Image: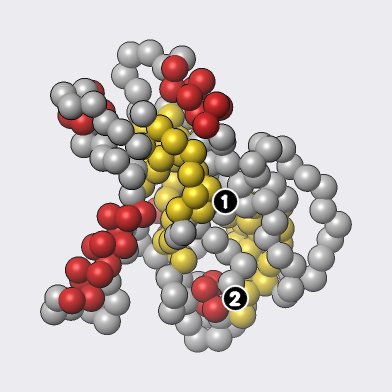
């Protein structure tokens, strides 16, 4: 069973609310609280309950789900904070974006829209432009000497197909800037097209 909800860390999405004992979902390792990002090759980011339920209902045979569990990731971070650490920061679920040598990064991103439609937006100053739901936005982030501090999922070589922000680390430039959020899709970084980039290339970009 699924529900449409909003998580404090990752925002609006479709979450697993109940799993029947002995079901295929339980055997596959899914747990209550998992956020469903995609079903087969169809993304659920920005989808409402009716759209998600209809998509799941029409699936047949082997179903591939892309999921993440923000609660589990948070619990793992807290556990890492309380244990002897090998590095200054907890290990993220996905390798974060590597620091660049340049002082600024220009990011072209889009935030999920509840309506599923893209809205027109006039050009805005990248240094101050907001990232609004359903609108493509170009923003400029001043990194100083720190990295962007993003954990990403997806890529052209995954079922998700696109690059999505999974987490914004509190000690990174993106968190300090405050405009990028979990669930936002990254379209470009410093003029490099992220629409069809693989996951590994996005990490190395």
Q: Residue 158: tell me if it is visible.
A: no
**Mark 1 = which residue?**
185
**Does residue 94 lie above or below 29 as drawn?**
below
**165 vs 70, nearest the viewer:** 70
How far from the left and from the top, in percent, is residue 28? 22, 31
**Mark 2 = which residue?**
177
- Callout 1: few (<14), some (14-19), or many (20+) C-alpha neighbours within 10 Å? many
Q: Earlier in the sequence, mark 2 or mark 1?
A: 2
**Does residue 118 lie above or below 27 as drawn?**
below
- Callout 2: few (<14), some (14-19), or many (20+) C-alpha neighbours within 10 Å? some
Q: Is residue 89 left or right of residue 159?
A: left
Residue visible at 50% across and 57% down in the picture: 182
Residue visible at 81% across and 65% down in the picture: 124
Residue visible at 53% across and 48% down in the picture: 12
Q: In which quarter of the view is residue 98 placed? A: bottom left
Q: Secondary structure at mark 2?
A: helix
**Does residue 143 lie above or below 204 as drawn?**
below
Residue visible at 61% across and 80% down in the picture: 142
State which mark lies toward you, 2 or 1. 2
Q: Is residue 39 left or right of residue 126?
A: left
Distance Cα–Cα, label 2 vs label 1: 17 Å
Q: Residue 84: tell me if it is visible.
A: yes
């Amino acid at each position: 069973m699924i529900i449409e909800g909003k998580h404090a860390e990752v925002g609006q999405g479709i979450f697993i609310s109940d799993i029947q004992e002995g079901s295929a979902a339980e055997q596959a390792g899914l747990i209550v609280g998992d956020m469903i990002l995609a079903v087969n090759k169809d993304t659920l980011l920005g989808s409402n309950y009716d759209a998600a339920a209809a998509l799941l209902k029409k699936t047949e045979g082997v179903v591939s789900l892309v999921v993440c569990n923000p609660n589990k990731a948070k619990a793992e971070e807290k556990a890492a904070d309380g244990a002897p650490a090998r590095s200054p920061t907890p290990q993220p679920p996905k390798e974060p974006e590597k620091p660049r040598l340049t002082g600024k990064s220009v990011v072209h991103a889009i935030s999920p829209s509840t309506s599923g439609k893209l809205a027109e937006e006039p050009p805005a100053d990248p240094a101050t432009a907001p990232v609004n739901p359903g609108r493509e936005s170009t923003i400029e982030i001043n990194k100083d000497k720190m990295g962007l501090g993003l954990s990403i999922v997806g890529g052209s070589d995954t079922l998700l197909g696109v690059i999505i922000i999974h987490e914004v680390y509190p000690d990174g430039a993106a968190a300090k800037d405050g405009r990028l959020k979990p669930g936002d899709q990254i379209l470009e970084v410093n003029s490099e097209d992220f629409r069809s980039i693989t996951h590994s290339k996005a990490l190395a970009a």
